[in-house]
Image (cartoon, rainbow, N blue to C red):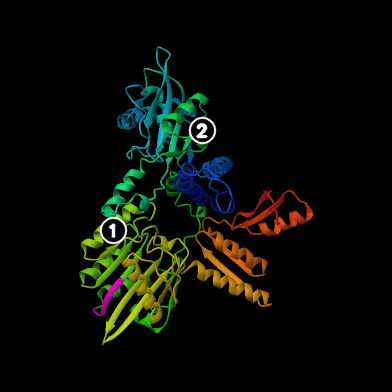
Amino acid sequence: MESREVPLCERLNFASIYQSNLDEFFMVRVGSLMDQMLLSKNLRDNKTHMTAEEQLKAIGRTVTRLNRRKDAVYAELMEHLEGYGVRLVNFQKLGSRESGELERYFDTEIAPLTSPTTVSRRQPFPFLQNKEIYAVGVLAGKSGQEKLGIIPCGTGVIPRLIGVPGQSGAYMLSEELILHFLPKVFSGYRVVSKSLIRVTRNADIDADALYDEDLDYREFMAKLIKRRRRLAPVRLELSRELDGDIVKTLCAYTDVKQDAVFRCRSPLDLSFLFQIQDILRQRTELFFEKRFPQRSAQFRPGCPVIPQIREGDKLLSYPYESMKPFLDFLQEAASDPNVVSIKMTLYRVARHSKIIESLIEAAENGKSVLALVELKARFDEENNIEWSRRLEEAGCQVIYGLDGFKVHSKLCLVTRRENGKTEYFTQIGTGNYNEKTARLYTDLSLMTADTAIGLEAAAVFQALAKGETVEESQQLLVAPKCLQNRILDMIDEEINAARQGMPGYIGVKINSLTDKVIIDRLIAASQAGVKIDLIVRGICCLLPGVLLLLYLMDQYGAQTVTVSHYGVREGYLHQKIQPALPDNS
């Protein structure tokens, strides 16, 4: 987002992603910390050694700092956009003709669709939807008594970007137009101050803790999703400075603590930036060069996939290679008369999923189809509930995972029987069975006819169908009992190699690295001389070089050391740290 080497419209994309990722962080991580703080104030995290309250305060300070950077970058991006004929305008700077046209547009197209509310004894403070924008005004009546006026800005009908009449490429955000005409909506009052506000609600619900065995699990999850929409707010954002007492009043109404209030100079929702991208789509220099997944050289085009897998293992690398060979594999299995069963774990699938269609076709062709649909896939629950219903209607056996766990594995097993011989074709992947994200995210997909792997995959599905975990495995790494211990053994092998003077190496590509036991063992491996490369997409609780720095600081009495983290495109990010030295450092 900050790098000027990135094309302008791609920087807009990163700005929007920054906001959506931060939203999810508050909904999940901050929400869980707030719940934890209520349950046990003195419980300390095993990595930071901070209580939930201390973590929340640190998050607040960091988010405030990051938001300042985001606001500065946003202002820079909008300035650059003006050079390409696109700009957001301030109503106060418009001429009388343009402002008159916008007022007429507001009167005819927006005002009739709004639902303004004044908060009083008779009219309570309205429920604020998660991540929706509201225009709020402090209203003074003739008696001088103040009250709040609120207008929801996200009706779902009003376009977010409103073109300014007579000015090509000039736009106003609909919420800014609503906020401007707040005095017109509440014409019987004087508007003392006004702002746009947005709340973010907790989305962290422990489904297993609330589940009753007497309930239908799928219907229980459907009701739980509806309940999540009304969970407590964890953040309040303001677009304008308001009087401290007004902020306290808003905090009281929304049940948000004042240290969870954030003021933003940039718009509270940056998703409109995608619309600006569309406006500039013809300016190819503003985007990365378009790239498409390529056909894998491991597969002969136009030939059936299953016989090619029988010849030897095949590995696809997304998004560089197309997912089509796997889709063809599943489609062949669905129509092959010698295929007797298909078993598959489903965590996140596309809205219009060819994979689901193949499973349904297989069931309709009389094959045994077992689909584990993880209904606890956060923010994809509704999609998965709907797919599970469709799969069941087609005759598939649908199961929903294990108590206390999410099934994250990406495993597909096709069993084929011909001339009295049974064959197993297994696909093991790191990415979801989602045709859309396979064009975006880097993942691997292995397809093999190895019988030992197939039999072990069959044992995994048997355990899942019985609601059990796998106790031991030889071919596959299966959590929770056969993953961490096996990884620790492999790390130890590299440590032993390094201690014997041989080159030791560990390469890790992972979504998140938060496991304290594995982190400690990686540190031990590094100290033993093992070269370690980490590619971590999300959360990483291991800071490279910190142990060495602690040792140097202890030896030489340094109080502050600058750590340099290298990031792709961003160059070097220098961060000064002042860690507390352990007693035995």
Q: At 33% from the left edge and 24% from the top edge, which residue is drawn? A: 123
Which region of the structure is painted magenta?
Answer: 337-342
Which x, y percent locates residue 526?
65, 66
For residue 456, side relative to residue 541 (left or right): left
Q: Is residue 522 above or below residue 136?
A: below
Which x, y percent locates residue 338?
25, 80
Given the image, on which type of amino acid does mark 2 rest?
Answer: Gln
Residue at label 1?
A: 387
Task: Indicate the quadrant where residue 168 lies.
Answer: top left
Q: At 51% from the left edge and 45% from the top edge, which residue is drawn? A: 84
Viewer can see residue 303: no
> Spatial distance from mark 2 to mark 1, Cα to Cα?
41 Å
Q: Earlier in the sequence, mark 2 or mark 1?
A: 2
Residue at label 2?
A: 258
Q: At 30% from the left edge and 52% from the top edge, which residue is drawn? A: 212
Q: Secondary structure at mark 2?
A: helix
